Image (cartoon, rainbow, N blue to C red):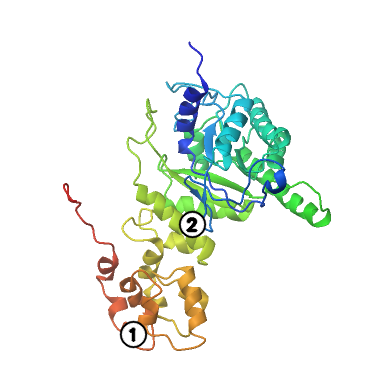
């Protein structure tokens, strides 16, 4: 078999990395190379498709070290029984690619994952060596995200955290039963044990930084994880419950959701088609409700239907509001921030502006309309100085009035 050149390897291993969604780059320490020291920065603008919470677009070289794998996870295109073209980078090749792309202003960081080759420890050593070359040999100060391997020696995972801005360990599936069935080489207790070790190391490093000025940082961007949606029978309620336990138990920065995508030569135990992408979107919205809108996990679960899944035609906040109409209408001139955040159509910024404005004057419906994309969605759930919804909130057809209208696209539209 002829040896592959760097471009061919890059084509294979960049494509193989596209299934991992946990590729954000927020929350890390700020570094730059001003004064001629080092290479790279975590502060500049990028040109790619990973976005920080402040709106910056972060460009990352997102690749696998190798797509060879000794594991046989049914949902993974790179499993050992899969008939795909294989490739493998050396740590030096990945470091050289990262530096070359950075100097050309293509990227400002690296997201590195890998299949398992030879053993978990050997693979983790190779990934750590890649980060070491960048940090120590080239003083690279850009962003590095390493996907760690839960089966690897904890000391190797710890070394990864000393070099990386963020580390992540994928829990893969929402339920232990689903993991056992679809990923027989993985163990839920082992995965959570590794996540617990990373959590402890992050807390310890922060404590040491408070006491010792030059104490080393450990994954200053925290840790994240990813769950595959739709590969097993787990409902949205199961997924929301799992995400909540992960946030609480391991202080994760983010939980990412990735809709299952059918793969070539798929196992017979997998679904024949992918779930609707809207399902993934609704899970991200539910995640937002728990993280920024004060909703408890059980309340998000209350927004699900009889099948345990969130409705696809309306967002979770509206679904909850329609189920608990006795909570409404909310008086925008008197109600607390917590209640205003539960009004469908009002985001966190709009609520902050309402709270600031009502200190100086009584708000009318037109004032609220200036703060939201659709006042139609907001009206049934609020009171203002000149507006009361009267019977609108209790209308039997309110859902159909507020659900987005389905439009047939024109085949030859200009």
Mark 2 surroundings: few (<14), some (14-19) or many (≥20) residues within 10 A: many
Between residue 301 and residue 166, name the one nearer to us: 166
Label 2 sits on residue: 287
Distance CA(mark 1)–CA(mark 2): 31 Å
Give how far across and how far down residue 290 sits, in percent: 51, 61
Between residue 139 and residue 180, name the one nearer to us: 139
Label 1 sits on residue: 388
Position of residue 83 in the picture relative to residue 374 (left or right): right
User: Which type of secondary structure does the marked residue at label 1 adopt?
Assistant: loop
Quarter of the view holding residue 166:
top right
Q: Where 76 falls versus 300 (above or below)?
A: above
Give how far across and how far down residue 220 sits, in percent: 67, 50
Q: Where 363 falls versus 148 (above or below)?
A: below
Residue at 67% over, 43% down: 141
Give how far across and how far down residue 297 sits, in percent: 50, 60
| Residue 164 visible to an observer of this rendering | yes
Quarter of the view holding residue 207:
bottom right
Residue at 42% over, 71% down: 346
Q: Where 93 falls versus 226 (above or below)?
A: above
Position of residue 28 in the picture relative to residue 345 (left or right): right
Label 1 close to label 2 by CB (< 8 Å): no
Between residue 142 and residue 337, name the one nearer to us: 142
Position of residue 406 in the picture relative to residue 227 (left or right): left
Between residue 53 and residue 39, name the one nearer to us: 39
Mark 1 surroundings: few (<14), some (14-19) or many (≥20) residues within 10 A: some
User: Which type of secondary structure does the marked residue at label 2 adopt?
Assistant: helix
């Amino acid at each position: 078999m002829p040896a592959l050149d760097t471009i061919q390897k890059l084509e294979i291993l960049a494509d193989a990395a596209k299934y991992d969604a946990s590729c954000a780059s927020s929350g890390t320490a700020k570094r730059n190379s001003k004064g001629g020291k080092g290479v790279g920065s975590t502060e500049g603008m990028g040109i790619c498709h990973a976005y920080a919470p402040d709106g910056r677009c972060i460009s990352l070289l997102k690749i696998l070290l190798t797509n060879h794998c000794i594991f046989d996870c049914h949902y993974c295109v790179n499993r050992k029984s899969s008939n795909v073209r294989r490739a493998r980078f050396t740590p030096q090749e990945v470091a050289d690619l990262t530096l070359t792309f950075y100097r050309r202003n293509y990227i400002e960081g690296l997201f590195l994952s890998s299949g398992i080759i030879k053993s978990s420890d050997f693979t983790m050593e190779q990934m750590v060596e890649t980060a070491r070359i960048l940090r120590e040999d080239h003083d690279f100060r850009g962003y590095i995200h390493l996907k760690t391997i839960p089966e690897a020696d904890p000391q190797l995972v710890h070394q990864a955290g000393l070099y990386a801005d963020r580390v992540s360990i994928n829990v893969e599936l929402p339920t232990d039963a689903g993991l056992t069935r679809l990923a027989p080489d993985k163990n839920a207790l082992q995965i959570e044990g590794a996540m617990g070790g990373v959590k402890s190391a992050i807390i310890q490093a922060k404590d040491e930084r408070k006491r010792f000025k030059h104490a080393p940082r450990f994954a200053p961007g925290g840790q994240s994880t990813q769950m595959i949606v739709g590969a097993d029978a787990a409902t949205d309620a199961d997924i929301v419950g799992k995400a909540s336990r992960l946030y609480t138990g391991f202080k994760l920065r983010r939980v990412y959701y990735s809709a299952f995508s059918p793969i070539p030569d798929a196992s017979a135990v997998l679904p024949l088609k992918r779930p609707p992408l809207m399902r993934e979107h609704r899970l991200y919205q539910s995640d937002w409700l728990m993280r920024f809108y004060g909703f408890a996990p059980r309340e998000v679960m209350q927004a699900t239907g009889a099948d345990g899944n969130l409705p696809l035609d309306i967002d979770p906040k509206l679904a909850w509001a329609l189920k608990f109409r006795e909570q409404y209408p909310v008086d925008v001139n008197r109600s607390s921030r917590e209640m205003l955040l539960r009004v469908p159509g009002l985001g966190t910024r709009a609520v902050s502006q309402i709270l600031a404005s009502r200190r100086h004057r009584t708000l009318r419906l037109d004032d609220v309309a200036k703060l939201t994309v659709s006042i139609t969605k907001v009206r049934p759930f609020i009171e203002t100085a000149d507006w009361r919804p009267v019977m609108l909130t209790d209308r039997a057809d309110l859902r159909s009035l507020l659900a987005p209208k389905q439009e047939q696209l024109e085949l030859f539209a200009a």
